[in-house]
Image: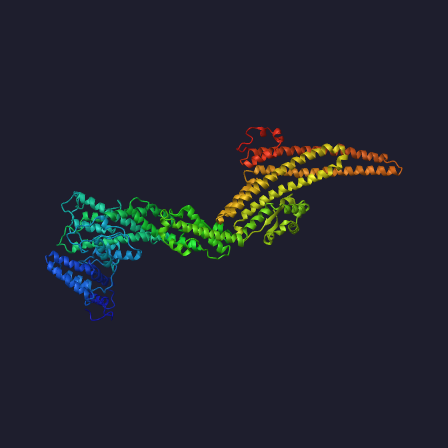
């Protein structure tokens, strides 16, 4: 030992470093790290005993060794002494002491080997180096055994997964205390899922693996390549070698050893991975019989399956974009691999024992290819379905990944089904966690977009219900139905709507079994997966959906008076408040007759307030009346006030979620149509009043009688048409649709039902008012008829005005004649008589024929348009519109004039093209 000391602490690491410097003759400051690492590996790793840290195994091994040598009495005596030693606390490291004594008693080992193993036992204070640490290949150096890497793999994978085992170990005879004469167990006893009843040998093997994995690290594939022992047999490979060449046949023990490497995904000496064939196989020139070769190839499939799974886990576990669900899937696979590593540890321990005691062979316990096939029967079956699962889950994440895993739980094999259910439970746990937070607090913790509820952070509060949250249908797990997903979406959306839009932070209390009981039941992920057997999850979703929706509707109906606003829209924008609309039209008549550019909004607003105060509208809630306003539409050349005037109703807050800007546009379209139709009714009422009052006055002008009669007939036709249209719109369209809307709104279960009912209502009145795309030709024709009614009003006013003026002049002439006659003068002079005669002639020969011609053209145009309108109605797809055509032509006067209306196919359901 060198006199100088690098580290004043007298620990094994410092002493070993001093020893390396001394043997190499290096100075204190020289770099000897590579040589120090090599020496450290030799002492701390290469000669680690196969039963490290297991006191019970050491004692059992000593007893079996004495029994095999025929020293049963000494074996019994040793057992008694060991029992007494356990009751004393004299020795702190009993297993190491017994192992050293056993090693010293074995005369088959060389002195160098015994010293090395003793150094490994008593040199535990030295730090362990990973098997993948690079070191130089020195001639004559002892290569590390594969045992270290196997046990290291178990330790690292178990620590990384952090999840309990699902595989069970197999019984390693010779390490578990089973008598040497016992045969191997059945496959079901050797490799079963965790939690099943295990045989004694398997439980002892599990205890052995649990203790022997301490302090190990997992080596890389390169480390495994360095650890392959030198083959005992070499071959002269030439073209004459065949697959059945047994002149220098490889011992079965060497093939078993290679298979244990292959099970770990590492090439052995004879069994290697061929990239072209993508399989582990033996070189054709190696001396192995065909039956044994086939058996090795079948067993090597386990290594190929392991590689496939491990590559997926290694690649995906580092992918941050995979998400929490994907990481859970990798953790579940890692757990399966950890249990597989335990199996490999048992097999390698068995194989190491055979190598350490080459002179002692027991055919009942030695590891052979046949026994290896039996022990790996269940693992191959299990790993095969894990590999299939990995292939089926490539490039999937979140709910889609959970759906793929769930599809494999429908397998008919109970063992496969058990494994897949265990993996699915781990995969579904993050989904269950996100689901729990969503339905309880409305929080969406989904950084990797794995959950089936999506959120758009750019959407503002006014569009929260419509656009902020939506369903990712591709991410809905197959064990959650579409109806459940819709309810889950509504639960969280309702909570967020209450908090953010309604400003209501009251905690929703779920009724039923109680909140705490319900939440505790929901915490069990199995409840989410076993819905066919247990309806608890459905009950939780139904209760949360019912109570959150009920709370939202209560706030909407009481605090924000949604139903009152809905009634206001019906009364004001849909002209349901008749007295208000009539009085407003009377006030606005003179102003709306002006050109649109001469209207002033403040004047119209004042008239609106006057109409409210003068009618029953004054008794409405002040908040509702403040929302009613006047709106002028976009001006076009030639428009009058009637064309641009419109009422408006301001909405904000939660009620704007139902009365969206798009809905407001539809309300304005319907209002304009109803306002125009109401104007026609108003105009014809004025025309009728004018006729009733003026006709009696004009009876003195006998020549006007035919014209006035034509006016009466045309007015009656127009009144009938407009009245039937008003009846259809107000009762068949508005009233029926409103009753249906009110019923659905009051019985609604959630906000979506209200929105859907309101949209159906708007669609119905849009269609009934001929404002949909299909009815555009009808609407155009109807507007042309309305224009003729306005034109008729103008013609009639002109006729009555001129006629009344002529009547007044005639009365003036008559009074003048009477006055002059009473005064004794001539009643008429020749000049006056000529003027009167000229005026009457002009009235009779020019005005009356002109007026008669105008009325005739107007009536003809009107009747032609109505006939065309009726033909279009009869070909419409809506039954109500076809029935409207019957009512408009109740006396069949138009049917007699129009051949198309007399056709048997006139009222068929096929729409005719005009």
Give the image quarter of residue 44. bottom left
In percent of width and height, residue 114 lies at 15, 61
Please give left or right for residue 318 compared with residue 877 in the image.
left
- Colour option used: rainbow
Query: Extreme left residue here?
Result: 70
Left or right: 785, with 364 as reference point? right
Q: Locate residue 596, reporting x and y percent.
A: 65, 46
Task: Name the residue furthest front.
Answer: 513
Residue 216 in the image, given as x and y percentages of width and height = 25, 59
Residue at (60, 34) in percent of width and height? 887
Question: Residue 309: in sight, yes or no?
Answer: yes
**Quadrant containing the C terminus in the rendered view:** top right
Q: Quadrant of the N terminus?
A: bottom left
Asked whether 571 or 135 is in front, the reply is: 571
**Along the line of sight, which residue is nearer the eye, 315 or 378?**
378
Residue 283 seen anywhere in this rendered image of the structure: no
Front-lying residue, 596 or 480: 480
Give coordinates of residue 311: x percent, y percent.
Answer: 30, 50
């Amino acid at each position: 030992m060198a006199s100088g000391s690098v580290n004043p602490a007298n620990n094994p690491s410092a002493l070993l470093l001093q020893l390396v410097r001394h043997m190499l003759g290096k100075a204190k400051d020289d770099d000897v790290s590579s040589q120090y690492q090599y020496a450290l590996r030799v002492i701390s790793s290469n000669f680690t005993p196969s039963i490290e840290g297991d006191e019970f195994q050491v004692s059992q091994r000593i007893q079996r060794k004495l029994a095999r040598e025929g020293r049963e009495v000494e074996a019994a005596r040793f057992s008694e002494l060991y029992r007494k030693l356990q009751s004393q606390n004299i020795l702190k490291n009993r297993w190491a002491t017994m192992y050293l004594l056993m090693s010293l008693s074995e005369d088959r080992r060389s002195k160098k080997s015994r010293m090395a193993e003793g150094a490994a036992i008593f040199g535990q204070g030295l730090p362990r180096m990973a098997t993948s640490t690079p070191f130089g290949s020195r001639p004559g150096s002892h290569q590390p055994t594969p045992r270290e890497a196997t046990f290291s793999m178990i330790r690292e994978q178990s620590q990384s997964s952090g999840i309990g085992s699902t595989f069970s170990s197999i019984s390693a005879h010779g390490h578990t205390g089973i008598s040497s004469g016992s045969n191997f167990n059945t496959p079901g006893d050797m490799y079963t899922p965790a939690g099943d009843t295990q045989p004694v040998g398997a439980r002892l093997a599990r205890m052995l693996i649990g203790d022997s994995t301490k302090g190990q690290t997992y080596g890389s594939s390169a480390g495994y390549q360095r650890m392959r022992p030198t083959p005992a047999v070499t071959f002269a490979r030439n073209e004459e070698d065949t697959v059945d060449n047994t002149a220098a046949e490889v011992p079965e023990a060497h093939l078993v050893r290679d298979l244990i490497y292959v099970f770990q995904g590492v090439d052995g000496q004879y069994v290697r991975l061929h990239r072209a064939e993508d399989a582990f196989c033996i070189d054709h020139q190696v001396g192995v019989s065909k039956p044994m070769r086939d058996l090795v190839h079948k067993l090597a499939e386990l290594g190929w399956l392991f590689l496939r799974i491990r590559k997926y886990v290694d690649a995906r576990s580092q992918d941050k974009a995979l998400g929490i669900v994907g990481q859970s899937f990798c953790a579940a696979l890692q757990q399966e691999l950890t249990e597989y590593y335990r199996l490999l540890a048992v097999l390698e321990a068995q194989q190491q024992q055979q190598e350490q005691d080459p002179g002692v062979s027991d055919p009942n316990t030695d590891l052979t290819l046949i026994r290896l096939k039996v022990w790996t029967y269940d693992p191959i079956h299990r790993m095969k379905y894990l590999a299939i699962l990995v292939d089926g889950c490539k490039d999937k994440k979140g709910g889609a990944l959970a759906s793929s895993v769930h599809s494999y739980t429908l397998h008919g094999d109970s063992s496969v089904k058990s494994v897949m259910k265990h993996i699915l439970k781990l995969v579904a746990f993050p989904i269950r966690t996100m689901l729990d937070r969503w339905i309880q607090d409305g929080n969406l913790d989904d950084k990797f977009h794995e959950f089936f509820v999506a959120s758009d952070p750019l959407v503002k509060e006014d569009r929260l219900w419509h656009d902020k949250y939506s369903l990712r249908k591709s991410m809905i797990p197959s064990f959650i139905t579409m109806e459940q997903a819709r309810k889950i979406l509504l639960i969280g959306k309702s909570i967020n709507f209450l908090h953010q839009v309604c400003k209501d932070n009251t905690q929703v209390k779920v009724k039923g079994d109680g909140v705490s009981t319900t939440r505790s039941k929901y915490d069990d992920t199995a409840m989410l997966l076993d819905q066919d057997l247990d309806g608890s999850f459905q009950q939780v979703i139904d209760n949360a959906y019912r109570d959150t929706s009920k709370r939202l509707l209560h706030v909407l109906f009481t605090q924000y008076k949604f139903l009152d606003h809905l009634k206001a829209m019906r009364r004001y924008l849909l002209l349901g408040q008749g007295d208000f609309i009539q009085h407003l039209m009377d006030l606005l008549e003179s102003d709306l007759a002006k050109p649109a550019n001469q209207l002033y909004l403040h004047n119209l607003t004042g008239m609106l307030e006057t109409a409210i105060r003068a009618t029953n509208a004054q008794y409405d809630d002040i908040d509702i009346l403040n929302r009613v306003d006047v709106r002028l539409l976009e001006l076009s050349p030639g428009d009058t006030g009637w064309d641009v005037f419109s009422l408006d109703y301001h909405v904000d807050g939660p009620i704007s979620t139902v009365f969206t800007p798009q809905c407001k546009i539809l309300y304005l379209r319907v209002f304009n149509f109803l306002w125009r139709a109401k104007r026609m009714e108003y105009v014809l009422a004025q025309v009728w009043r004018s006729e009733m009052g003026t006709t009696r006055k004009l009876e003195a002008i006998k020549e006007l009688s035919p014209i006035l009669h034509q006016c009466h007939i045309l007015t009656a036709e127009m009144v009938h048409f407009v009245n039937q249209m008003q009846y259809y719109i107000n009762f068949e369209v508005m009233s029926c649709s409103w009753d249906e809307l009110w019923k659905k709104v009051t019985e609604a279960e959630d906000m979506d039902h209200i929105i859907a009912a309101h949209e159906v209502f708007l669609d119905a009145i849009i269609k009934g008012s001929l404002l949909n795309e299909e009815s555009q030709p009808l609407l155009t024709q109807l507007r042309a008829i309305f224009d003729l009614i306005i034109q008729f009003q103008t013609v009639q006013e002109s006729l009555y005005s001129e006629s009344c003026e002529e009547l007044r002049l005639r009365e003036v002439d008559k009074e003048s004649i009477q006055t002059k006659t009473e005064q004794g003068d001539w009643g008429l002079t020749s000049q006056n008589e000529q003027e009167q005669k000229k005026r009457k002639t002009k009235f009779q020969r020019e005005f009356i024929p002109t007026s008669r011609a105008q009325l005739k053209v107007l009536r003809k145009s009107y009747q032609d348009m109505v006939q065309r309108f009726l033909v279009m109605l009869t070909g419409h797809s809506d039954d109500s519109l076809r029935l409207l055509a019957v009512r408009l032509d109740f006396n069949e006067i138009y049917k007699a004039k129009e051949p198309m209306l007399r056709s048997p196919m006139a009222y068929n359901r096929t729409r005719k093209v005009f």
